Image (tube, rainbow, N blue to C red):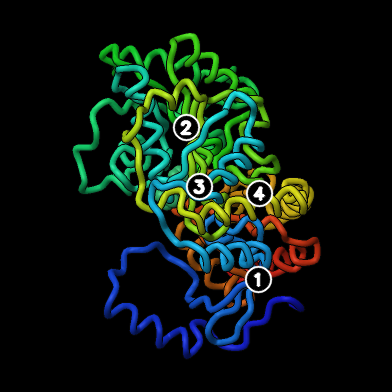
């Protein structure tokens, strides 16, 4: 029985329905499938729709509102900053200096410079440009299933066909290689015995595809859009060894995985990775559009004056938000909460997997977990239709979930990092009930 979430109308409720109708008449309908709910307001992990229904949120927008929806300190900081100054482009403002100092203070020491932008895609475009400029070469190694955004360099490095359909040819020089999706290993190997043959395969891929102009590698800390796919322990250090031994630059896309999501401030901390460039987005503003490239000073230093700009990047409101978010994360120890609540949620999801024949795989760490739905556990046939149905059933019972995945069959379990034990348990009860109704 739900005590926190409360849904009093069939979904969509009457006001939501009317808004969906008005919207369809005036805005292009090209966003992905979501529960039929029009959000009105949100606080912590709770979202209330325009019909007065309250849901527990497992989406965090799309892994954005890490410090909780509308955290009062974040709202206060944004209100104060916006009352003073909204935009001054490249003229310096004080919040920008403070945000840069704070960001550098939470990064590993080798990443000693940053640059503020507005979106994740922008950071990827910037990182790819820097890798090319610094190396004087143009080929970029990236991964099957990778998603780095919808702008052109990001799209070209991406390893999902969907976002590229109809836009070809993409940028030359993209060399895509298999990512260790161990549940569906492209080499049909077993993680216990494979000795990471996918790393050895990189040499074959480069031999077959490179013209001798390799600049660097871009990779997500885990595959986000492809279905929250985490590489096995040891894979990243082996990848880093591989690329270093070839003198390649290393960009880690932490647009999604940073700011506490995996239980560390940055996912790179798990295996002490030392990328040259890190793309940071989403959680850095926790709802306020902000992003940043963090880099070794020597690498980003290849850009001289006037060589990088962004109309909104580094604006005082976004920078005030970044400062507030870092302060909140530190004070409320949100990485620790992500680890603790994430562990209890994963344990319960794994128990559900034993009971529900549609749960093929449960994976992830901290508060980013993927639940992959299949029609049959043996054949692993993906179940995108069931996934969609589950999104609706969960919403009707008070839980907002979304889906990702190469096959559109992975449920995102990614609540704001402030989620309490009681909220976690209630949301899991709702999820289990929704599963039983499939
Ligand atoms: C890993 C990763 N990189 C880049 C992006 C692009 O970010 P944005 O949508 O802010 O441009 C995303 C967005 O989902 C992402 O998950």
Q: CA distance from mark 4 to mark 2?
A: 24 Å
Label at residue 281: 3
- Lower position in the chain sequence, tag 4 or tag 1: 1
Which residue is situated farthest in the top direction here?
245
Residue marked by disc 2: 219
Look at the numbered discs 4 and 2 and tell me whether their residues touch, using CB distance below 8 Å: no
Please name the residue shown 57% across and 28% down the image. 111
Residue under pointer 1: 43
Numbered marks: total: 4
Which of the two labelled residues, at mark 3 and mark 2, occupies the earlier sequence position? 2
> Quick one: 26 or 117, which is closer to the camera?
117
**Marked residue nearer the N-terminal end (4 or 3):** 3
The CA span between labels 3 and 2 is 15 Å
Between tags 4 and 1, which lies in front? 4
| Label 2 secondary element | strand
Residue 322, x across and y down, in percent: 58, 51
Image location of residue 343, percent across then percent down: 76, 48
- The residue tagged 4 is 326
- Measured as percent of width and height from the top left, residue 364 is found at 64, 43
Estimate the x, y position of residue 355 in percent, counting from the top left. 71, 56
């Amino acid at each position: 029985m739900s005590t926190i979430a409360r849904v009093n109308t069939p979904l969509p409720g009457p006001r939501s329905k009317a808004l969906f109708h008005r919207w369809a008449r005036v805005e292009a309908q090209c966003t992905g499938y979501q529960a039929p709910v029009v959000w009105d307001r949100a606080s912590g992990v709770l979202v209330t729709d325009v019909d007065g229904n309250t849901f527990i949120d497992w989406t965090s927008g799309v892994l954005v509102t890490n410090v909780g929806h509308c955290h009062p300190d974040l709202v206060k900081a944004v209100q104060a900053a916006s009352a003073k100054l909204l935009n001054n482009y490249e003229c310096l403002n004080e919040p920008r200096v403070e945000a840069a100092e704070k960001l550098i203070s939470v990064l590993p020491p080798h990443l000693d410079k940053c640059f503020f932008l507005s979106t994740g895609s922008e950071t990827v475009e910037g990182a790819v440009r820097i890798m090319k400029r610094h190396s004087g070469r143009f080929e970029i190694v990236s991964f099957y299933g990778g998603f780095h955004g919808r702008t052109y360099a990001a799209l070209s490095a991406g390893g999902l066909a969907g976002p590229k359909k109809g836009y070809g040819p993409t940028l030359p020089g993209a060399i895509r290689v298999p990512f260790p999706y161990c549940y569906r290993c492209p080499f049909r190997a077993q993680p216990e015995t494979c000795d990471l043959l996918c790393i050895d395969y990189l040499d074959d891929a480069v031999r077959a595809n490179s013209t001798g102009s390799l600049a660097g590698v871009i990779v997500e800390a885990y595959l986000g859009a492809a279905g929250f796919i985490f590489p096995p322990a040891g894979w990243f250090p082996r990848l880093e060894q591989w690329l270093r031994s070839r003198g390649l630059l290393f960009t880690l896309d932490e647009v999604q995985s940073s700011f506490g999501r995996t239980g560390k401030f940055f996912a790179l901390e798990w295996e002490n990775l030392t990328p040259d460039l890190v793309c940071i987005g989403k959680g850095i503003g926790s709802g306020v559009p902000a992003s940043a490239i963090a880099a070794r000073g020597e690498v980003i230093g290849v850009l001289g004056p006037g060589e990088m700009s962004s109309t909104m990047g580094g604006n005082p409101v976004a920078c005030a938000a970044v400062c507030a978010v870092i302060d909140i994360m530190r004070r409320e120890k949100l990485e620790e909460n992500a680890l603790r609540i994430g562990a209890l949620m994963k344990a319960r999801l794994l128990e559900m997997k034993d009971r529900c024949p549609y749960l093929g795989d449960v994976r992830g760490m901290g508060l980013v977990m993927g639940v992959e739905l299949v029609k049959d556990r043996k054949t692993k046939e993906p179940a995108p239709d069931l996934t969609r149905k589950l999104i609706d059933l969960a919403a009707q019972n008070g839980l907002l979930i979304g889906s990702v995945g190469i096959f559109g069959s992975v449920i995102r379990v990614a609540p704001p990092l402030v989620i309490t034990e009681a909220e976690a348990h209630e949301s899991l009860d709702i999820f289990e009930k929704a599963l039983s109704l499939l």
